[in-house]
Amino acid sequence: MPVLKELTHLPVIVDPSHAAGHWKYVKPLARTAVVAGADGLIIEVHPEPEKAISDGAQSLKPEKFYELMEEVRILTEVMKKQIEVMQ
């Protein structure tokens, strides 16, 4: 992440759903990406992943997605405060 952010002016978007391949790893990878400086996330979400035509195994159910978004919100607030203190 830091190397990409140095090499480009473009936003760095991370896709933990495809990187993980399984829903139980999506949240930890997403949190890690945010802390590492990702500008955005692509998260697969499906109300019934077992019935999804594709990518069901890596899809979060909506309630898990909402939990993740709250965690991301908290992480970004903490990181912003830490950056302000360091400046």
Image (spheres, grey):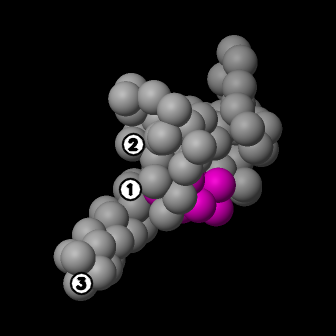
The Cα–Cα distance between marks 3 and 1, rounded to whole angstroms, is 24 Å
Please report the residue visible at 59 percent of the width from the left and 43 percent of the height from the top.
3
Residue indicated by mark 2: 39
Expressed as whole percent of the image width and height from the top left, the position of residue 64 reads 51, 56
The Cα–Cα distance between marks 2 and 3, rounded to whole angstroms, is 21 Å
Looking at the image, is 8 positioned above or below residue 43? above
Query: Which of disc 1 and disc 3 is earlier in sequence?
Result: 1
Q: Main secondary structure of the magenta part?
A: helix
Answer left or right for 79 relative to 24: left
Amino acid beneath label 3: Val
Do tag 2 and tag 1 residues touch (Cβ < 8 Å)? Answer: no
**Which tag is nearer the camera, tag 2 or tag 3?**
3
Find the magenta span and give its range: 28-34
Q: What is the crowding at mark 1: few (fewer than 14 residues within 10 Å), some, or many (at least 20)? A: some
Q: Secondary structure at mark 3?
A: helix
Q: Report the residue that reaches farthest toward the bottom.
A: 85
Q: Quick check: is 35 in the magenta stretch?
A: no
- Can you tell which mark lies on residue 69? 1
Expressed as whole percent of the image width and height from the top left, the position of residue 66 reads 39, 55
Q: Nearer the viewer, residue 81 or 72?
A: 81
**Which tag is nearer the camera, tag 3 or tag 1?**
3
Expressed as whole percent of the image width and height from the top left, the position of residue 56 reads 70, 30
Q: Secondary structure at mark 2?
A: loop
Looking at the image, is 81 positioned above or below residue 12? below
Residue indicated by mark 3: 85
Q: Nearer the viewer, residue 1 or 65?
A: 1
Please report the residue visible at 49 percent of the width from the left and 63 percent of the height from the top.
35
Query: Which of disc 1 and disc 2 is earlier in sequence?
Result: 2
Please report the residue visible at 37 percent of the width from the left and 29 percent of the height from the top.
9
Looking at the image, is 63 positioned above or below residue 57? below
Q: Secondary structure at mark 1?
A: helix
The Cα–Cα distance between marks 2 and 1, rounded to whole angstroms, is 14 Å
